Amino acid sequence: MQAVLCRHHGPPESLELVDCPSPMPAAGEVVVEVHAAGVNFPDTLIIENRYQFKPALPFSPGSEVAGSVAHIGPGVTGFAPGERVLALCGWGGYAEEVAVKASALVRLPDDVPMDAAAVLAATYGTTWYALKDRAALQPGETLLVLGAAGGTGAAAIQLGKLMGARVIACASSPGKLALCKQLGADEVVDYQAQDLRQALKELTNGRGVDVAYDPVGGSLTEATLRSMAWGGRLLVIGFASGTIAQPPLNLALLKGCNILGVFYGAFMEREPQRHAALLQELMAWVGQGRLRPAITERLPLAQAAIALRRLADRQALGKTVLITERGRVAAQRT
């Protein structure tokens, strides 16, 4: 099989596409034939040894894939070869096959496409958990989305609208803001060209925003905290800017607002049943046509380094999916 390997820690350009033996499932594992792999920001960190998970070298990045069951290891029940599945593998997904624990598999309904399934967990799962569980976003509330043209930001726009919120999307260029409008944002703010606090004050008539979704960090976090409504909720999603903000905590006191951490990986491990129910909700929305993941680019597996470079440079819009040759052939048959 082919796999994209990180032999030594470094930038995306250091990755290699190689031929290697197919994995064999250990006890409790299943080998999945990968059709599509989601491209996520942590993939850019793990290859540089800057992520909280540090797999031994060599390894393949890629934390979520969609495909079909190829082989079943000893002790595994409930899955059969050929079944369509979503696999949450942590790493190893940029390959034509990956071995994962059976507990990390989720069955895919026939009406959920493989490419859509490959972006549901890390991006849309994080966002659904953040907005529904952590922030309890309510219909009619105002949701501010930072980094709104990226993968998690695009998901926040779409899910926020499905939940009945008024969505203010913030991004750093006219092209990115155009995508935000296409995804359903009610208002947009270019925080490179506009003062974020002033823009939010005007758009909310001085009231502030009820929920803020922040995957960016840096200086935008404090400006956002100063723009919260009374009783608002600031969701800490990540730090794509590369800087962990240290805002004055008296602002939380003065605003009567909450700062809520969103650690989706820990949620998956600590509350597997709730996580499974969350994914089932998302897959049902996709199957019903209510949610169409914002996939803007589908690239072959061989172009994984290109996809990661664009993501690292914050040039990627929406979601990028890597398609294996097996996935391409399977899609042509359907």
Image: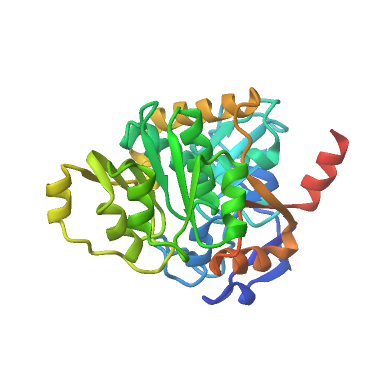
**Residue nearest the observer in this picture, 53 or 1:** 53
In this view, the residue in front, 221 or 170, is 170
Location of the C terminus (image quadrant): top right
166 w.r.t. 253: above or below: above
How far across and down, in percent of the image, does residue 6 sit? 59, 70
Quadrant in the picture for the N terminus: bottom right
Q: Position of residue 100 (x, y in %)?
A: 55, 45
Q: Nearer the viewer, residue 188 or 22?
A: 188
Left or right: where 147 falls relative to 98: left
Would you identify the image quadrant in which residue 257 lies?
top left
Q: Which residue shows up at 62% across the image and 43% down it?
A: 182
Could you say where residue 311 lies in the image, as x and y percent from the top left? 57, 63
Q: Position of residue 233 (x, y in %)?
A: 27, 41
The answer to whether residue 122 shows anywhere in this view is: no
What residue is at 56 percent from the left and 33 percent from the top?
Answer: 106
Image colouring: rainbow
Residue 196 falls in which quadrant of the image? bottom left
What residue is rendered at 50% in x and 39% in y?
186
Point 21% across, 43% down: residue: 258
- The answer to whether 268 is drawn above or below residue 322 in the figure is above
Q: Could you say which is closer to the camera, residue 176 or residue 300?
A: 176
